[in-house]
Image (spheres, rainbow, N blue to C red):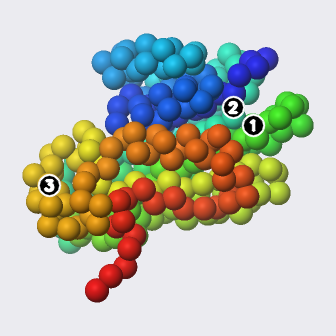
């Protein structure tokens, strides 16, 4: 049985997932890092960063949309560590092509929904059941599940509707899991990033540079993956233990309604 807490992070090889992995390693967690491929440069570079912070690094290859693959992955983590303390459901994709909702294809819709919504929901279901079983087995065991959604869960983009719909669904999934698991002593939170500088937004950087300079974001800057990592570290540390179901929007003030 591992004495250190263990964090499972999907979409860990780059961007937000990478920053969360490093932040949680600094908080004393061993890291089970999940990405579609363990052989990517991102995963190879992440290992030394986690270990530098004192965490053990366990790279796992998984396409989160493969729900039939979840059981084996979870069992491998439990076989290695004997526990899962934190799940960060971060994996997600944008549409391969930005098309108006009136042109959006079923193929694109299904791809985005399977990766961004169906996969994370059933992965959380599987791990939540294990957390319930582990609760009476471990001392000082305070399991947490975090869903990484997006400001797009509440804001329309007509040229990537499938992404917005998937994140809106994931937001409600976070609420439902928080409700159901509260009686089991498992805390569930939603972290809602704003416009974050990652590979996902690189193709539209010029567009958002202009919009941000014009005041779209009240704090007048891009968000960075480290902004999200710090928020997740705070949650995992136990700073919000009487706040299950809480939504943390990390968006530089996009949440401010104004005329």
Residue in the foreground of this view, choosing between 2 and 55: 55
Rendered-image quadrant of the C terminus? bottom left
Q: Circle 2 is placed at which residue position? A: 84
Residue occupying image coordinates x 59% and y 58%: 174
Q: Circle 3 is placed at which residue position? A: 209
Q: Circle 1 is placed at which residue position? A: 130
Residue pushed farthest right? 136
Residue pushed farthest bottom? 259
* SS under mark 2: loop
Per the model, the C-alpha gap separating discs 2 and 3 is: 39 Å
Q: Are marks 1 and 2 in contact (CB under 8 Å)?
A: yes
Residue occupying image coordinates x 77% and y 57%: 182
In the rendered image, which quarter is residue 42 located in?
top left
* SS under mark 3: helix
Kindly report which numbered mark, 1 or 2, lies closer to the viewer in this rendering.
2
Q: Are marks 2 and 3 in contact (CB under 8 Å)?
A: no
Residue occupying image coordinates x 69% and y 31%: 84
């Amino acid at each position: 049985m591992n004495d250190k807490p263990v964090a499972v992070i999907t979409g860990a090889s780059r961007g937000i997932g990478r920053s969360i992995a490093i932040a949680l390693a600094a908080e004393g967690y061993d890291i089970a890092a999940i990405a579609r491929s363990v052989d990517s440069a991102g995963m190879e570079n992440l290992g030394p960063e986690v270990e530098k912070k004192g965490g053990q690094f366990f790279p796992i290859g998984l396409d989160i949309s493969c729900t039939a693959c979840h059981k084996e992955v979870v069992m491998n983590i439990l076989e290695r560590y004997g526990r899962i303390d934190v799940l960060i459901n971060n994996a997600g994709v944008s549409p391969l092509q930005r098309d108006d909702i009136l042109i959006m294809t079923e193929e694109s819709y299904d791809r985005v929904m399977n990766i961004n919504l169906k996969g994370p929901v059933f992965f959380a279901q599987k791990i939540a059941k294990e957390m319930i079983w582990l609760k009476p087995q471990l001392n000082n065991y305070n399991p947490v599940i975090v869903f990484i959604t997006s400001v797009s869960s509440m804001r329309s983009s007509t040229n990537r509707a499938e992404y917005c719909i998937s994140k809106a669904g994931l937001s409600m999934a976070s609420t439902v899991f928080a409700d159901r698991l509260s009686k089991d002593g498992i805390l569930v939170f939603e972290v809602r990033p704003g416009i974050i500088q990652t590979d996902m937004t690189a193709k539209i950087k010029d567009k958002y540079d202009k919009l941000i300079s014009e005041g779209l974001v009240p704090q007048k800057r891009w968000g960075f993956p480290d902004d999200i990592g710090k928020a997740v570290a705070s949650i995992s540390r136990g700073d919000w233990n009487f706040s299950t179901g809480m939504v943390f929007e990390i968006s530089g003030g996009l949440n401010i309604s104004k005329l």
